[in-house]
Amino acid sequence: MKSRAMNKSADRVFEKTRKCRRQLAKLPFEKKIEIVVKLQRIAAEIRPDKRRQAWPI
C-alpha cells in the first residue's frame, strides 16, 4: 500500500518535470539565457562567491 502511494507521488513529480521541460523546449534561446542569468543572480545573493558571478547581460 505504501509503495503504491509513493509510486503515485513519484509519477506526479515526473509528469510535472516532463511538462516543465516541454515548456522550456518551446522557449526561444534568448529567453532561456534570461532565465539562466536570473537564476545566477538569485544564487549570487544567497551565497556570494567572486569566482561565480552572473553573466553581465
Image (cartoon, rainbow, N blue to C red):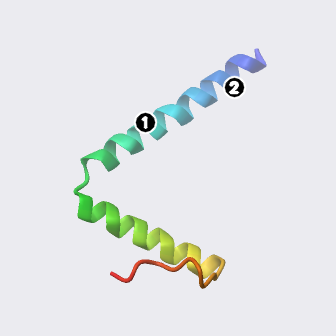
Question: Is 25 placed left or right of 20 in the picture?
Answer: left
Q: Which residue shows up at 60% across the image and 85% down it?
A: 50
Q: Which residue shows up at 69% across the image and 17% down it?
A: 4
Q: Secondary structure at mark 1?
A: helix
**Label 2 crowd (10 A; few <14 / some 14-19 / many >=20):** few
Which numbered circle lies on residue 37? none
Between 3 and 22, the one lying in front of the other is: 22
Question: Is 8 placed left or right of 28 in the picture?
Answer: right
Q: Which residue shows up at 38% across the image and 65% down it?
A: 35
**Label 1 crowd (10 A; few <14 / some 14-19 / many >=20):** few
Identify which amino acid the numbered label 1 is placed on: Arg
The image position of residue 13, as x and y in percent, is 55, 36
Question: Is 6 placed left or right of 42 in the picture?
Answer: right
**Real-space CA distance between mark 1 and mark 2, rounded to the nearest whole angstrom:** 18 Å
The image position of residue 38, as x and y in percent, is 43, 72
Residue linked to disc 1? 18
Reply above or below: 8 against 22: above
Q: Quadrant of residue 31?
A: bottom left
Q: Residue furthest top?
A: 1
Q: Which residue shows up at 39% across the image and 43% down it?
A: 21
Residue linked to disc 2? 6
Between 55 and 44, the one lying in front of the other is: 55
Question: Is 22 placed left or right of 11 in the picture?
Answer: left
